[in-house]
Image (tube, rainbow, N blue to C red):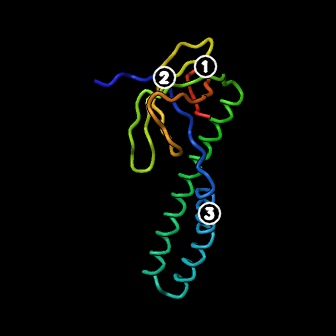
Amino acid sequence: MAKARSGRQASDDLGRVAFVFLLSCTIGVLVVPGILVYHLVTGDPQEAGAWGLGSLTCLFIAFMLTSGLINSSRDNRRLRASGIPGTAKILSVESREDSIAAVLLIQADGLETFEADAVFSWGRVRVGAQVDVVIDPSDRLFAVI
């Protein structure tokens, strides 16, 4: 049985690629309905239906990316406002397809030491290494810095 972990890693920034993709989806949401109306007016309902489905898909993806950006921003604001510095020792690592999962032992002055799961999308991560973290003591939200 796996040991319960008590920390929660802050959302990562989605980065430039996500921003460009979000911008493309937003443009798609604005342009595609015009193409849909064009096909309806010219009498091609099958083509209009395909463009309508594309418009809904762009809208859904834009909504999901916007939601991720909002969560990331909220977590980062909280950590800047009330976060305290600490350190984390990497207890275990597991390579995944596009990231590295790790178990951290996090400690900071005035806070009970706790274990937490973390995901790294960058760098070399090895067992026993120490990394700097910032922690919100109210609910153990943390970010590796």
Locate residue 86: give its quadrant.
top right
Q: Mark 1 points at which residue?
A: 137
Name the amino acid, label 1. Answer: Pro
121 and 9: which is toward the camera: 121
As drawn, 4 above or below 24:
above
As drawn, 105 above or below 19:
above
Is disc 2 placed on a helix, strand or loop? strand
- From the viewer's perspective, tell me whether residue 74 is left or right of residue 89: right
Q: Residue at x 64, y 62 (%)?
A: 23
Q: Position of residue 31 (x, y in %)?
A: 62, 73
Which of labels 3 and 2 is toward the front? Answer: 2
98 and 79: which is toward the camera: 98
Instruction: State the mark number for residue 68.
Output: none
The CA span between labels 1 and 2 is 15 Å
Q: Quadrant of the C terminus?
A: top right
The CA span between labels 3 and 1 is 38 Å
Q: Name the residue under label 2.
A: 105
51 and 115: which is toward the camera: 115
Is disc 3 placed on a helix, strand or loop? helix
Q: Name the residue under label 3.
A: 26
Which of labels 3 and 1 is toward the front? Answer: 1
Name the amino acid, label 3. Answer: Thr
Contact? badges 3 and 2 (CB < 8 Å)? no
Give whichever of discs 1 and 2 has the lower sequence position. 2
Mark 3 residue crowding within 10 angstroms, few (<14) / some (14–19) / many (20+): some
Q: Where is residue 97 in the image (x, y as percent from the top left)?
A: 39, 50
Give whichever of discs 3 and 1 has the lower sequence position. 3
Q: Which residue is drawn at 64% across and 37% down?
A: 74
Which residue of the protein is positioned furthest toward the bottom in this rendering? Answer: 42
